Amino acid sequence: MKLATTPAEQRQWMTQWQYAAVALAEFRRFELQTLTEAGAWRQVEAVLSLAGHYPQPKDASGLVAQQA
């Protein structure tokens, strides 16, 4: 990916993201308007199901044990 280095490229980049922000807001509004309670629960359950796929954090870093 090429970085926008000139002022003209930077303006074009900003314009592109401003249009994207509007489009994303419209899409989000549409998604929320068409969301059903059942659909919301499916999404919640999908997120909660990820909890078992990642290791639990350790209770301690082991630093105290190393100092002893």
Image (cartoon, helix red, strand yellow):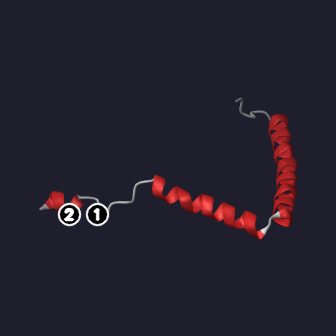
Res 11 quadrant in image: top right
Residue 3, quarter of picture: top right
Using a 10 Å C-alpha cutoff, classify the residue at mark 1 as few (fewer than 14 neighbours), some (14 to 19) or many (20 or more).
few
Query: In this rendering, would 16 be left or right of 59?
Result: right
Q: Amino acid at mark 1?
A: Ala
Name of the residue lying farthest toward the top: 2
Can you say which quadrant of the picture contains the C terminus? bottom left
- Percent across and percent down for residue 66 are 17, 57
The residue shown at (20%, 63%) is: 64
Q: Tag 1's secondary structure?
A: loop
Q: Is residue 54 above or below residue 8?
A: below
Front residue of 5 and 29: 29
Residue 34 as seen in the image, left or right of residue 52: right
**Where is mark 1, residue-wise?**
60
> Badge 2: how crowded within 10 Å, few (<14), some, or many (20+)?
few
Q: Residue at x 80, y 39 (%)?
A: 10
Foreground of the two, 44 or 3: 44
Return the x and y of residue 34 as percentages of the image width and height: 85, 63
Q: Count of labels shown?
A: 2
Of the residues shown, which amino acid type is indicated by label 2? Val
- Quarter of the figure with the N terminus: top right
Instruction: Please state if 57 lies on the left or on the right of 20 as rendered.
Output: left
Q: Which residue occupies 28% across, 59% down?
A: 61
Q: Position of residue 63 (x, y in %)?
A: 23, 59
**Numbered disc in front, either 1 or 2:** 1
Determine which residue is flagged by label 2: 64
